[in-house]
Image (tube, rainbow, N blue to C red):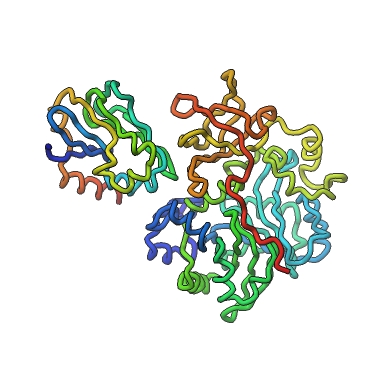
C-alpha cells in the first residue's frame, strides 16, 4: 500500500493498485465532535477531484466530505452509515468512507504527506 | 465590540472547554468528553451549566408593582405565592415575543431570568413600561449556575442544606458560606435540578465544590440537545418577535384567569388566536432513519407544497435518533401526520410527533 496522503479538506487517501481508499482524518473528527450521521457517494458514480463526495454531521453541524482525487466509486463503507460513532472511534482505519478507481495518479502529487498535514492542521486550527 | 466573559471563564479553560461566541459572550460549547457524553451524564447523574450570561433582573416593589406587571405579563401575579416561579413572555402589542423568561415572586419584589441576547433590550422595554416608580437592577455582580439531573438534589443539598425541600418551580434564599444564595428548583433540560444565583466572587469555589461532589461541567452543546429532547423552546429559534405564544403552542403558560379580561400587552391578539386558532403552530418532528434536519429546513406535504420550516434540529442522544421542532400550517400539525423535509436538495420522510421527545423527571411535590 502507498504512503498515506492528506488533503486540505482533511481527507486521507491510500492507494492500492489503482484503487484509492478515502476517509476523514482524526483531526477532522476532533474538530467536528460526535458524529451522528454520514452520507456516502453512490457506487458507480464518477467524482471529480475536490468535488463533494458525501456529508458528515456532528451534534453541532453538517460538513461536506470532498474527494481529493477523481475517479469512479467502486465501494462504500455502509457500516459507518449504520453506526456513525465509528468515525470518531477509528477514523483513519476501519471507518473509511469510500473507494475510488483512480483516474489520474498524478493528482496525488498535489496532496500533503503526514508531516506536512500535521503542520497544516496545527496552523489552521489555532 | 469586545467579547464578554463570565466569572467562570478561567474554570472552563482549565477544564479544557471549547469555546464559542454566544450572545456576545465567550461560552463553553463542550468540554473534552464531548456533547453526547455530557448529555448522557446529565440525564443519568448531574451536570453543571454556567448560565451566568443570562440576565438576572431584580425589580423591587409591593402590590403596586404586581399591578403594573400584570399589565405587561399574561400571568395571575396577584395570586402567585411568594417564592413561586412562572414561565412567561415579554410581548409587543401584536403578541410577538421579545423574550421568554422565568419570573419569581420574592419578598422584595420580583426576580426575572432573561435570555442573554435579549436582556439589555428587555431592561429598556421594562424601564419604559414601568417608568421610574420601581428600582430595577440587572445584576451583573451575580453568576447563575444550573445543576441538572437525578443526582443534583443530593449533591446540592450536601452544600446548601434544605434545597431538597423545594418544589418544582419554587425558590428561596439560602445562607451558605456567609452569603445569600437564591436557589430555584427549575432548569431547562427536562431533568430535576436547580438554578443558583450567587455572587461572582463565590461562584468559582462553589462550582469546584459541586465538581468535588461528583457533578461535571456541561457545555452549551449538550444544553441544546437536552432542551430539544425535552421539547423546550429556545429564543431566536422557536421564538422571536414574529411568533406568538399561541403559535408557539405555549397556551399553558398563559394564566386562564387573564384570558377573560385581558389587560396585558398583546392580550387582544392572544384572545383572538385562542378562539380562532393560529394559522401555523409549533410541533415536534421526527425524521425517519438517521437524517438530521437542521434549522431553516423546509417542510413539504405530499403534493410538494411548502407547509412550514424547522426551527431546531439535531441528534437526540437519549432518544438515539434525530429530532426537530418547527412550525407547520395548522392542518398538518396533528401527531403522526406524514411530512417531507428538504435536505441538500432531496426530500426525506418525517412524522409530526408529540412533545417532549424525552419524558421529564421533574419532582412535583416534596411537601
User: Is residue B150 something one can see in this rendering?
Assistant: yes
Residue situated furthest top in the rendering:
B303
Point out the image quarter for the C terminus of chain B: bottom right
Query: Quarter-wise, where is residue B350 in the image?
Result: top right
Q: Position of residue A102 (x, y in %)?
A: 18, 25
Q: Position of residue A11 (x, y in %)?
A: 26, 38
Image: B130 above or below B306: below
User: Residue A74 vs residue B364: left or right?
Assistant: left
Q: Position of residue B303 (x, y in %)?
A: 59, 18
Q: Residue at x 59, y 28 (%)?
A: B338
Q: Residue at x 19, y 31 (%)?
A: A20
Q: Position of residue B113 (x, y in %)?
A: 64, 58
User: Is residue B111 something one can see in this rendering?
Assistant: no
Quick one: B262 or A38, which is closer to the camera? A38
Q: Residue at x 73, y 49 (%)?
A: B253
Residue situated furthest right in the rendering:
B261
User: Residue B259 vs residue B288: left or right?
Assistant: right
Image: B344 above or below A87: above
Query: Quarter-wise, where is residue B150 in the image?
Result: bottom right
Image: A25 above or below B115: above
Amino acid at each position: 500500500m502507498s504512503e498515506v496522503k492528506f488533503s486540505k479538506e482533511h481527507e486521507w487517501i491510500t492507494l492500492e493498485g489503482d484503487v484509492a481508499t478515502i476517509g476523514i482524518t482524526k483531526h477532522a473528527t476532533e474538530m467536528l465532535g460526535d458524529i451522528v450521521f454520514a452520507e456516502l457517494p453512490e457506487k458507480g458514480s464518477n467524482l471529480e477531484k475536490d468535488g463533494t463526495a458525501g456529508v458528515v454531521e456532528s451534534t453541532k453541524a453538517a460538513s461536506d466530505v470532498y474527494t481529493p482525487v477523481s475517479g469512479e466509486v467502486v465501494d462504500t463503507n455502509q457500516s459507518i452509515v449504520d453506526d456513525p460513532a465509528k468515525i470518531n472511534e477509528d477514523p483513519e482505519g476501519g471507518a473509511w468512507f469510500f473507494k475510488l478507481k483512480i483516474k489520474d495518479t498524478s493528482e496525488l502529487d498535489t496532496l500533503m504527506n503526514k508531516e506536512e498535514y500535521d503542520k497544516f492542521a496545527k496552523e489552521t486550527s489555532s | 465590540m469586545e467579547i464578554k466573559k463570565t466569572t467562570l471563564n478561567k474554570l472552563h479553560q482549565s477544564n479544557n472547554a471549547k469555546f464559542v461566541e454566544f450572545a456576545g459572550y465567550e461560552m463553553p460549547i463542550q468540554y473534552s468528553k464531548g456533547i453526547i457524553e455530557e448529555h448522557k451524564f446529565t440525564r443519568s447523574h448531574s451536570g453543571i451549566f454556567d448560565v451566568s450570561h443570562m440576565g438576572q433582573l431584580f425589580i423591587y416593589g409591593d402590590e403596586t408593582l404586581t399591578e403594573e406587571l400584570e399589565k405587561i405579563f399574561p400571568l395571575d401575579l396577584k395570586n402567585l405565592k411568594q417564592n413561586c416561579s412562572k414561565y412567561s413572555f415579554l410581548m409587543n402589542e401584536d403578541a410577538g415575543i421579545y423574550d421568554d423568561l422565568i419570573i419569581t415572586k420574592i419578598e422584595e419584589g420580583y426576580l426575572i431570568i432573561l435570555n442573554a441576547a435579549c436582556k439589555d433590550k428587555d431592561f429598556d422595554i421594562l424601564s419604559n413600561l414601568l417608568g421610574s416608580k420601581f428600582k430595577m437592577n440587572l445584576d451583573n455582580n451575580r453568576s447563575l449556575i444550573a445543576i441538572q439531573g437525578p443526582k443534583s438534589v443530593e449533591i446540592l443539598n450536601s452544600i446548601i442544606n434544605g434545597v431538597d425541600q423545594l418544589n418544582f418551580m419554587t425558590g428561596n434564599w439560602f445562607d451558605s458560606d456567609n452569603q445569600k444564595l437564591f436557589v430555584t428548583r427549575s432548569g431547562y433540560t427536562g431533568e430535576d435540578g436547580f438554578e443558583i444565583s450567587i455572587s461572582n466572587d463565590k461562584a468559582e469555589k462553589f462550582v469546584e465544590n459541586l465538581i468535588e461532589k461528583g457533578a461535571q461541567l456541561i457545555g452549551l452543546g449538550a444544553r441544546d440537545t437536552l432542551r430539544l429532547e425535552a421539547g423546550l423552546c429556545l429564543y431566536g429559534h422557536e421564538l422571536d418577535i414574529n411568533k406568538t405564544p399561541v403559535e408557539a403552542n405555549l397556551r399553558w403558560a398563559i394564566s386562564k384567569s387573564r384570558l377573560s379580561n385581558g389587560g396585558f400587552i398583546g392580550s387582544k391578539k392572544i384572545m383572538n388566536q385562542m378562539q380562532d386558532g393560529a394559522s401555523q403552530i409549533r410541533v415536534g418532528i421526527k425524521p425517519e432513519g438517521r437524517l438530521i434536519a437542521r434549522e431553516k429546513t423546509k417542510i413539504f406535504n405530499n403534493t410538494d407544497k411548502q407547509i412550514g420550516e424547522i426551527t431546531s434540529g439535531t441528534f437526540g442522544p437519549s432518544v438515539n435518533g434525530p429530532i426537530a421542532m418547527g412550525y407547520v400550517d395548522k392542518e398538518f400539525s396533528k401527531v403522526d401526520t406524514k411530512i417531507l423535509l428538504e435536505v441538500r436538495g432531496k426530500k426525506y420522510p418525517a412524522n409530526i410527533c408529540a412533545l417532549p421527545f424525552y419524558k421529564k423527571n421533574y419532582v412535583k411535590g416534596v411537601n
